[in-house]
Amino acid sequence: MSEPRTMSEKIAIRNEQAQSLVDTLTCSFVQTLKPYESARRLYSGGQDWLNANESPFSNPFELDDSSFNRYPSCQPDTVVERYADYAGLEKEQVLVSRGADEGIECLIRAFCEPGKDNIVICPPTYGMYAISAETFNVQVTKVPLLEGFALDADSIIAQCESPKLIFVCAPNNPTGTLVEREKLIQLLDAYQNKALVVVDEAYIEFAKEQSVSDLLNSYANLVILRTLSKGFALAGLRCGFTLAAPEIIQTLLKVIAPYPIPEPVAQVAAQALSKEGIERLNQQVDYLQSQKAVLVEQIAKLPQLNLVGDLYANFILMRATQKQALMDYLVSQGTLIRDQSKQLNLDDCLRISIGNEEQNKRLMSLINQFYENVGALT
Ligand SMILES: Cc1ncc(COP(=O)(O)O)c(C=O)c1O
């Protein structure tokens, strides 16, 4: 066989060999998976990012670089202590991780045997519970939400005999709905010695009174997920929290990466959780709540749009006439929102994250333009 001459020939051969290695070595359950399609991956342009439930605020922070030559602490004390204070818990009840997503992954890795165990999810809901489970060959049992997106606790209990984890998202993404406290208690009681009930409170800053963190002291099987990505306006930081009994936190520490929280992340998170940081959080959440009310009022005036679900988060969900054409028009004008129509019972639904006043005005004028002109012609 003659030696390849050019670099591109060498690269073509290398790629072919890599493909053949991948075909023979990849775990069978990984072969069928697809890489996660984040908003950033789907779109390169755009000025108004209203598609990932991020905050429109970009806040200033200070960094002290004097210890960047050292490995960071696995669980930075100040961050854990300040979050425990913020949540009204003991520091032993708090795990800090690379976003709430890493909390989900740690729970699955620590409690689910690959190829054997299953988790329960209640669609339509946040996609990462299923994605994370699939990457560890853990089965996913789906028990859909009822009409009005209420939790179907009775069916979960009747159908799911031995799940390891039951994921309940409250406020739920993408419906913005809550979970009735009695239903949650029903689940916690039914699975008291059998399974963990994981309540994802990623959006709790927008529905503060609705947290179930007070139940952590009475229920050993309750786990709560939190994040700095939403109300705290720090999606780029990748910092989240798992709240649970100390014994559960200790178990998660067995599987988490040795240094999940880079030192700059710990410094920024500590500032976000300071007294001033929390005051700022509250002001920004108030502002977003008032922007949400304005948007809701304007959407309600349009017969082509119908609000779906509830408003307990920093986004709204609506069913739209000419959904695809509207979505395409907004994207072509640089306003990115999220299509949720593939989710169970959400046909023709679009989700819009609440932006700042300017972004929301631009969005509404584009939507009005669409239904008056562009959409009217198609
Ligand atoms: C319900 C829910 N949980 C968790 C997350 C992920 O949070 P994090 O950015 O902390 O990984 C999101 C992000 O959109 C979410 O919607």
Image (cartoon, helix red, strand yellow):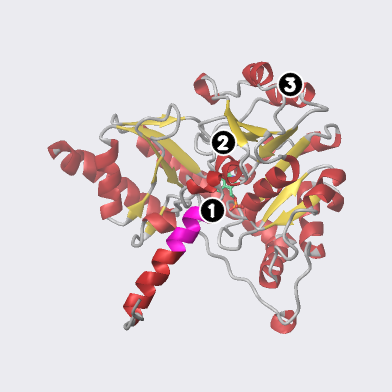
Q: Which mark is residue 172?
A: 2
Which residue is painted at 74% across and 60% down in the image? 275
Residue placed under numbered mark 1 in the picture = 26
* Residue 25 visible in image: yes
CA gap, disc 1 and disc 3:
41 Å
**Which of the two discs, 3 and 2, labels the residue nearer the N terminus?**
2
Q: Quadrant of residue 47?
A: bottom left
Q: Which residues are magenta?
A: 18-24
Residue 166 seen from this side? no
Label pair 1/2, CB-CB below 8 angstroms: no
Ligand 1 within 8 Å of disc 2? The answer is: yes
Q: Nearer the viewer, residue 345 or 358?
A: 345
Name the secondary structure under disc 3. Answer: helix
Q: Nearer the viewer, mark 1 or mark 2?
A: 1
Q: Is residue 332 left or right of residue 156?
A: left
Residue underneath mark 3: 186
Distance CA(mark 3)–CA(mark 2): 18 Å
Residue drawn at (51%, 22%), measured in percent from left and top?
Answer: 148
